[in-house]
Image (tube, helix red, strand yellow):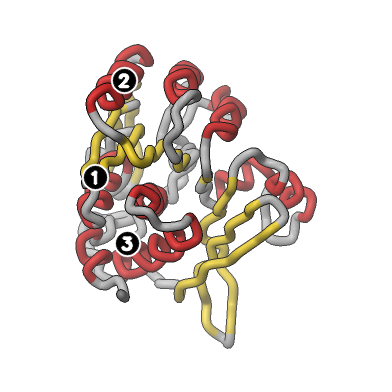
Amino acid sequence: MKIVLTIAGSDSSGGAGIQADLKTFEAFGVFACSALTVLTAQNTQGVSNIQEISPEFVQEQIQKVLEDFDISAIKIGMLFSNEIIDIVRETIKDLNIPIIFDPVFISKAGSKLLNDDAIENLKSLFPYANIITPNLYEAKELFDYDLLNEKAINEISKLPCKVVIKNDIIKKDNEDFSMDTLFDKENKKVFYTKLVSTDNNHGTGCSFSSAIAANIALGKSLEEAIKISKEFIYQAILNAPNIGHGKGPIAHKKGKECLKD
């Protein structure tokens, strides 16, 4: 069995963060290990409090997993502070393991998930990642990205890692589509699913990056992994359980069951 490690924060409502990662890994049939970075008090309507885990304990969690398991891929999510960013970087920098980094610092509900002084420091992890997966808000903050900003796109093409930017909305044949764009140096590839008009999208970014990690662990190419992961999220949104009073969670198990062979 393939084994993956997620380094991320906990979501008390179960829809995002470590909880979403574990559900995604289980759906794809890989064994999941985890290292917690923060605890959050949150629900589908937002985050009310964040408690940071000590950087030394974050490092110890990672080291203990690496000592005992043959890890096939690592997903990194919410890191929260400069101190945790620094210690995660030092712990992973010499590993020869595919790393999928979701630079989590702005949620879909608009909640800030990173200390303001740590945003620039996130970029110090880019040389050690195979791919980063920012959402539109995060890409705007990191690169001043939008579809028409050639300067930002040129900056992205010079990064030491590949980048997939999530959830641009475009219209094709009078229908709205969700578009994810993979930037691989000078090359660009887009992935589409129909846009689902719903509030059930809590944790989609976490689940997308962990689905990529799972599929990389299973031997898929990066483009295959992204294609599978995008369809997985689409199906998981379509089959969402409709719970909570804000942005509800998705159905991870159903998302995998509904994937086309």
**Residue 253 versus residue 114 in the image, above or below:** below
**Residue 120 versus residue 75 in the image, above or below:** above
Q: For mark 2, does the 10 Å Cα neighbourhood hold few (<14), some (14 to 19), or many (20 or more) residues?
A: some
User: Mark 1, mark 2: which one is toward the viewer?
Assistant: 2
Residues 4 and 193: in front is 4
Position of residue 157 measured from the top left corner of the image (x, y, whole percent): 70, 48
Query: Which of the two discs, 1 and 3, labels the residue nearer the N terminus?
Result: 1
Position of residue 61 measured from the top left corner of the image (x, y, whole percent): 28, 21
| Residue 200: numbered disc | 3
Going by the numbered disc 1, the residue's amino acid type is: Leu
Going by the numbered disc 3, the residue's amino acid type is: Asn
Position of residue 7 measured from the top left corner of the image (x, y, whole percent): 35, 32
Q: In which quarter of the image is residue 58?
A: top left
Residue shown at 57%/63% (left/top)?
168
Q: Determine whether label 2 and label 3 are within 8 Å by CB.
A: no
User: Mark 1, mark 3: which one is toward the viewer?
Assistant: 1
**SS at mark 3?**
loop
**SS at mark 2?**
helix
Residues 193 and 106: in front is 193
Q: For mark 3, does the 10 Å Cα neighbourhood hold few (<14), some (14 to 19), or many (20 or more) residues?
A: many
**SS at mark 1?**
helix
Q: Quadrant of residue 14?
A: top left
| Residue at mark 1 to residue at mark 2: CA–CA distance | 19 Å
Query: Which of the two discs, 2 and 3, labels the residue nearer the N terminus?
Result: 2
Going by the numbered disc 2, the residue's amino acid type is: Gln
Q: Which residue lies furthest to the top in this view?
A: 56
- For the C terminus, the quadrant is bottom left
Residue shown at 75%/55% (left/top)?
149
Q: Mark 1 points at which residue?
A: 22
| Residue at mark 1 to residue at mark 3: CA–CA distance | 19 Å
Q: Name the residue under label 2.
A: 63
